[in-house]
Image (cartoon, rainbow, N blue to C red):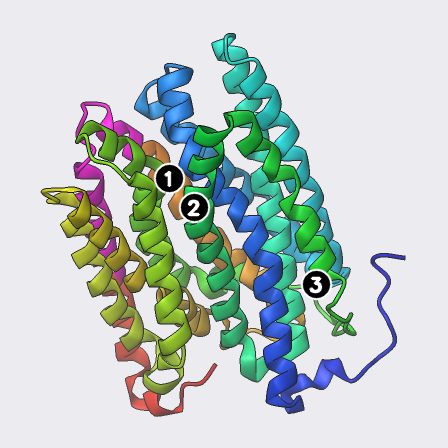
Amino acid sequence: MLFRHKKNTGLNSSEALPTPKISGYLFKIFAIIFPEFLIMGISLGVLPAYVHNQLLFGNLVVGVVIGTQYAATLCTRHFAGRIADTKGGRASATTGLIFSSLSAVFCLLSSSLSSFRLLSLAILIGGRILLGIGESFLVIGIFTWGFNLVGSNNTGKVMVWNGMGMYGGMACGAPLGVFLATKFSLGVAFGSIMLFPLLSFGIMLLLPDVVLAKQAVKLPFYKAVQLVWKSGTGLALSSFGFGGIASFITLYFIQQSWQGAYLAITAFGAGYIVVRIFLAHLPDKFGGGKVAMISLLVEIVGQVLIWKAPNATAGICGAGLTGIGMSLVFPSFGVMALKNVLAENRGIAIAAYNAFFDLGIGLTAPLAGLIAEGGNYSEIYLFGAIAAGISIMLASLEYNKSKPNSKGIAI
């Protein structure tokens, strides 16, 4: 059976696994997540213009459509974390891929009924809800599975490679979505959403099952939230920068008569991945609080650059700097969030932590829509800079609290 847990293969003590085996697991994790987030990128590349220009709805509705996915993700993190902890990462991830594939059916139906604006919008929102549920179960499943595979000493590496798959997929998906929609049709772009989960499922079959830790006491979701809320709030505030880029960078570029809006999303993803590849060890070496503060400063510079951009090149560079800044925020706050969580509760804890990211993105899209209602798209990125500044304060508090032991901080 698909969700059956195999006999103990020794993977539950994988702290002693050789580096090449750990690297192999991490690459497979990346390869599973990457196609799923190609779907996200495709959506971000084509949906704002589709809702605004073809369905003829305003900026607030665009924000609601984008934010609906993250709201659905937020509302299902609890269930995803519980399934991952009790039935295993494979069960949670497979559930996520099924929902993601179903979302394509709704998107295709929406595009075919675009002449019926309200009906098309309602169906599209339904597809976004399905995609949000799919992302929730897949990401939490892969996180938990990865933690169990590589051991507690390597949880930060799982975060790094998972994040590279997420933002790498979005970076590549945005131009892919624009290419498919302009070269072929919007239906082709939406139809591709159905194929990528199949690729993820095929790669998922290459990962071995692991023995789940016995849960003497199940950690309630609200208690997991209590454990991670400080780091989670910092993460949520930092995510506003990405939320503004994801939701409205396309319409901002159109308003300014600039070309290459999709390149801004690509630049964000490229900056994010490059830092993850070459600087992922920094939270280990210097501590999560310090790395988070420096990263958030870079994000602020990127957001201000987009806010005051005189041309498309400056806007794209600002998006790239935002990606560079955000790259290590997730693992930095994440290391702090999970350091006191038992192994058998990592699934529910990482679900609670991720929920704060979903909350940040989910709130950003409609808030950004309200800000942009008067046509002030640039003000969205001032908002992102201010949010990152508040996040720095939270990181500073955490840094000051752990400063005496900073040399001993480890993932």
Position of 49 relative to 340 (above/below): above
Is 344 placed left or right of 30 in the picture?
right
Q: Residue furthest top?
A: 116
The residue lying toward the viewer, choosing from 53 and 120, is: 53
Query: Crowding near pointer 3: few (<14 within 10 Å), some, many (20+)?
Result: many
Q: Which residue is mark 2?
A: 359
Q: Which residue is mark 3?
A: 85
Q: Tell me whether the residue at label 1 lies in contact with that at label 2, contact meaning CB atoms closer than 8 angstroms.
A: yes
SS of the residue under disc 1 = helix
The residue lying toward the viewer, choosing from 168 and 259, is: 259
Is 294 placed left or right of 132 in the picture?
left
Find residue 73 and report its image quarter: top right
Query: Crowding near pointer 1: few (<14 within 10 Å), some, many (20+)?
Result: many
Position of 1 relative to 251 (above/below): below
Image quadrant holding the N terminus, namely bottom right
SS of the residue under disc 3 = helix
Q: Residue furthest right?
A: 1
Q: Tell me whether the residue at label 3 lies in contact with that at label 2, contact meaning CB atoms closer than 8 angstroms.
A: no
Q: Is residue 405 magenta?
A: no
Q: Determine the CA span between mark 3 and mark 2.
A: 22 Å
Position of 107 relative to 378 (above/below): above
Task: Report the magenta residues as a range.
Answer: 368-391
Counting residues from the start of the chain, the first of labels 3 and 2 encountered is 3
Identify the amino acid type marked 2: Leu
Q: Which residue is mark 1?
A: 363
Q: Position of residue 151 (x, y in %)?
A: 63, 81
Whether residue 343 appears in this view of the structure is no
Q: Position of residue 365 (x, y in %)?
A: 36, 36
Q: Determine the CA span between mark 1 and mark 2.
A: 6 Å
Identify the amino acid type marked 1: Leu
